[in-house]
Image (spheres, rainbow, N blue to C red):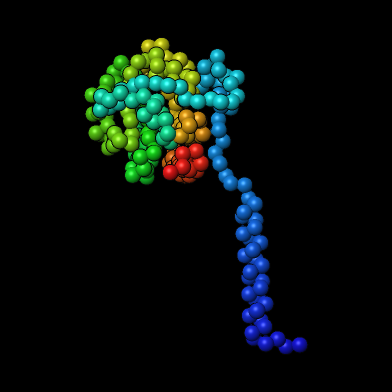
Amino acid sequence: MVLKKSEYLKIATILLVFVVGVYVSIKIQEPEFSLPILSPSDLNPALVEDSIQSVGMDHFVGEFSLISQDGDTITSGDVQNDIRIVNYFFTTCPGICRDMARNLRKIQTRYLSNNAVKIMSHSAMPEYDSPRVLSDYGRRNQVNSKRWLLLTGDPSLLNDLARTSYFTVLKEGEGWDEHSFIHTENLVLIDHRGRLRGYYDGTSEDQTDLLIDHIKLLLQERNKFFEKYLPL
């Protein structure tokens, strides 16, 4: 039996609709990818204060009050609804800090127009890195203080945050210099609720690109959260 051209077109249309329907149904059933919520027990114990290494749930970044490169007081309340990228550095660092600064500039450029994204670089040498020193460093590294905070303050608080909130140093600092405070190349991704969502090698361009993509995921998650709990 020879089919007419119109019949061929009808069969092709039916097949196309069937294939599209199957594809759409598969995509609908696929679980939506989300970043894990990390706790101290998930991390390298060398980065975690002994007293909280067994914490398996409900870890949130602690409260803080620090000073920015502009001399402003920055508290946890100022960034509580923001997506945060956190690291430790010092302005005289001759090695990994330069690579990290380059990649952080890339993140700053990508999210420069988004007020919900903040980069927070904490000094590992607060006795030297005064607001003025941080400000000079910021100018040399094209830091926009509205998006990228360079933070200094009480050494004990900075150390406590590193060991009990962000987990970015290998041992507790004693003299607060490059010999006793061993910071890592880690960039830490914090969500709008203050939870740990990822660690990235701040010296790697590939890891930085991955972090940029993951920030986008957290922004979508943040938007859904506020649409649900704080509808306009």
- In the picture, measured across the screen, residue 44 lies left or right of residue 130, that is right
Residue 91: give x, y in percent of width and height: 31, 25
- In the rendered view of the protein, which quadrant contains the C terminus? top left
- In the picture, measured across the screen, residue 201 lies left or right of residue 150, that is right
Residue 4: give x, y in percent of width and height: 67, 87
Asked if residue 113 is positioned above or below residue 177 in the image, the reply reads: below
- In the rendered view of the protein, which quadrant contains the N terminus? bottom right
**Residue 132 visible in the current orientation:** yes
At 65% from the left and 66% from the top, the residue drawn is: 19
Residue 145: give x, y in percent of width and height: 29, 34
Viewer-side residue, 92 vs 12: 12
- In the picture, measured across the screen, residue 173 lies left or right of residue 141, that is right
Q: Residue furthest front?
A: 232
Q: Quadrant of residue 131?
A: top left
At 66% from the left and 73% from the top, the residue drawn is: 14
At 30% from the left and 35% from the top, the residue drawn is: 146
Residue 183: give x, y in percent of width and height: 43, 23
* Total numbered labels: 0
**Residue 109 visible in the current orientation:** no
Viewer-side residue, 200 vs 177: 200
Viewer-side residue, 222 vs 161: 222
At 65% from the left and 79% from the top, the residue drawn is: 10
Q: Quadrant of residue 96?
A: top left
Q: Residue furthest right?
A: 1
